[in-house]
Amino acid sequence: MHTGRIESDETSHGHVPERQLRQTGVRRHHHRPRVRHSRHRLVENRHDLHIQKHTGLRCAHSDSRRIDYSNEQMKNPVTYYLLISLLLLGGAEGWCQKPSPFVLVGARQTATVVVGSGEPECVRLAVQDLIGDVQKITDQQIRVTASTPGRSYQNAVIIGTVGRSSVVTQHLPESRQLTGKWENYRVQSVGSNLVLAGSDERGTMFAVYHFIEQYLGVDPLYFWSDREPAKRTALSWDTVSITQSTPTFRFRGWFINDEDLLTEWQRPGEPAAGGKRNIDYPFYGQVVAPQTLRHVVESLVRLRQNLIIPASFIDIRNPAEAALVQEAARRGVFVSMHHVEPMGVSAFTFFNYWREKAGLPLNGKGGNDVPLFSYFSSRPQLEEVWRVYATEWAKYPNVIWQIGLRGIADRPMWLADPGIPQTDADRGRLISEAMQTQMQLIRQVDKRPNPPITTTLWAEGSVLNKAGHLKIPEGVTVVFSDNSPGWRMQADFRDTPRQPGHSYGVYYHHQLWGSGPHLTQIVPPAQTYKVLREVYEKGDTAYAIANISNLREFVLGADATARMLTGFSNFRIDVFERNWFTARYGASAAQVQQAYQTYFDGFALNSRTQTPILMDGQLRSIALGQLRELRLQLTDSAGYAVHLKQQKVETEESRWIKSALADMGSENLDTQTLLKRVQAQKTAHLRADSLAQLVLPQLPVSERRFMETNLLANLDLILGLETWLEGVLQARIAANANRLSDVETNLQHAVAAFDQMQKGQHRIATGKWQNWYQGDKKMNLEECRRVTETIRNKALSERPGSRAVNKRKSG
């Protein structure tokens, strides 16, 4: 049977081997005899331990069976050793007994789950998950009943929130110490019962999920990793004990951003989409189905995270989009907004509001019939929309407001309105004025005494803040960001003096569209730990949001980050990685870990910034840019010359990209040098693939399946993209040397590279995931292949002796 008692200031785990405890620096709590001031009580404990040492039994003292060691006869050593002899000869069983184990599911009995009738929906949903997990493991369904105040229970799982459930404190009096604390909880076996007590509703919910993970062995990300718990006929433990105090980061969770795959994916038997989104944008025309988001939020709370931004864009007045907020709210988590839609208003939302008032179709577009999206030129109109949307958002519980000022499609507002003053000081002043107005509107509609409010300093916000041009209202949580992605924080994080009127947090990217990562995981947990350690050491722990996009590609990063954010001081990256690989790959863990590490280490870094330059998004954008230029080379020499001149002209947008998004970009390398960097990265990833293929046959079926989806598919996609760009760059070099036959040959190699990318997708898109890439509109690999084939065909037609060339000659 399973036994263990572990206590930690920030994170706790059930019984695990000592080496696993070192994952978070947790020390096992060893029972010691209680020391009282009474000399006789001290002697009593010493004698009990002596008895236990020789009999293997623990004495359960009661008033009726306790021996009075202060009695003069008991001080006689002859009497004492006579007693020991009697116990050893068989009398001990009548006086001392082993404590009864807690039995959740046994051969002759099954525990009943007792839940307070006043517990909120999030706790009741967690209880449903507990019942479902037990049934999944044992094929037994445990019974649930509402608690009755004052009743004494036996063989029960008693779940409740301190201050709301008197039954919890009745059966675990020390749980009263949780009162008034933030997301604290205790899970403790008491006699034949198991008590799960939380300081608040999320504390109680997290207690359930911590028990499920630690003692039932259920992966919090099981839905996305396809890792089901092992079957067992019985579930019982000598001791169950978990203690969780206040998490390191108060608000912590996920941003479902650039969610193109989630938008159109459907699990068989579930709806494919939640409805239509009216925006003037090539992505997210459909809304993620609520049932799909339900799986996301379930994983979030199983990892004991309490915050989500449920989509890139949320128009709260669109029922299909409001359903996503409702889905998150029922789980008891906090809900916030993308930094491109402060007050819940994006440019598309603004345009649709005014189009609706004008009786125009809702398509998210501006135009002559709607106001300009600008706080400079259309201030009253924008404030009106803010007020309407703030009123709608305030109807939901646990909203974390976002304030600030952004433009269209994640760009600065001044790119949408040339009339905005063009100095950084004036721009900073405009944003500061907007934030003051937004604060006033929030206070009017949100009746909480101190509603949480954030402003995210991403891109131009970071630049203006670093220069001292922003005046952020007191009481706002300032959220710093990386845009590397995931490799390092922006400069203002290090340079900004922390003010007592603010709290601080972090926006961290596992995924970042444009540069990547997107279809593949690229940021290793050790790099995440390095970045978040800086945040932790600065004390910026009020808020943390991790961009995880479609989630499935980033289960390793999401898992590691959740553990860090919950209990950073006890987290050890080396132990986490060792335990993570051991849990998933058993005896082959060390070999598999080497393959993963070789993959992560293989990515080329910028020599100056030490940030990646050849991630999946970067490989795509470089290849398409090279193909556009190659097409001009082959078909329009005059147009190509004009294009080269235009590249040297600096625009307002190019200046913004250079100043605000420098860490996302690749180095400015010539074609030959870039080709060498691509080939070096490809060689490293071929080495990782060889290591993975070597260990693959040794793995059981379930472990092999996870490795195929979590590593080998990544390698297929990245190697395919690298081979694609390699062929395109070689074609450019050949075109520059006027070797047209080599252009066509290299482009043919580039086209063939998509077969390997497709192989990676096929590894992933099986079973319930068969439609996973149906919504691939960001990387859009099908379109990339089509463009490459078109230019390949053009190069073929331009080869000497081709029909097109001969026709031009004869003409």
Image (tube, rainbow, N blue to C red):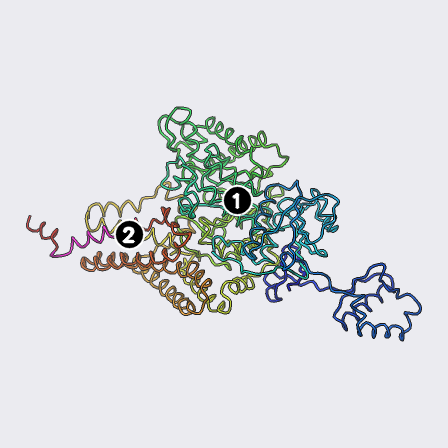
Apparent side of residue 651 relative to residue 809 in the rendered image (left or right): right
> What residue span does the magenta drawing correspond to?
783-801
Overall secondary structure of the magenta section: helix
Q: Between disc 1 and disc 2, whose residue precedes?
A: 1
Single out the residue that lies furthest toward the top. Answer: 358
Apparent side of residue 810 relative to residue 39 in the rendered image (left or right): left
Marks 1 and 2 sit apart, C-alpha to C-alpha, by 35 Å
Amino acid type for the residue under numbered disc 1: Ile
Q: Nearer the viewer, residue 6 or 50?
A: 50
Apparent side of residue 465 relative to residue 57 in the rendered image (left or right): left
361 shown above or below 241: above
Q: Nearer the viewer, residue 408 or 63?
A: 63
Is residue 603 highlighted in magenta? no
Q: Which residue is tagged 2?
A: 785
- Rendered-image quadrant of the N terminus: bottom right
Q: Quadrant of residue 236?
A: bottom right
Is residue 791 highlighted in magenta? yes
Q: Nearer the viewer, residue 602 or 720?
A: 720
Disc 1 crowd rating (10 Å Cα; few below 14, some 14-19, many 20+) is many
**Which secondary structure lies at badge 2?**
helix
- Given contact means CB atoms under 8 Å apart, are the residues at marks 1 and 2 in contact? no
Q: Quadrant of residue 571?
A: bottom right
Q: Which mark is residue 308?
A: 1
**Which secondary structure lies at badge 1?**
strand
Apparent side of residue 414 relative to residue 102 in the rendered image (left or right): left
Single out the residue that lies furthest toward the right. Answer: 72
Residue 237 at what x, y percent from top left? 65, 61
Instruction: Kindly identify the residue that appears in the image at 52 percent across and 44 percent down.
Output: 308
Amino acid type for the residue under numbered disc 2: Arg
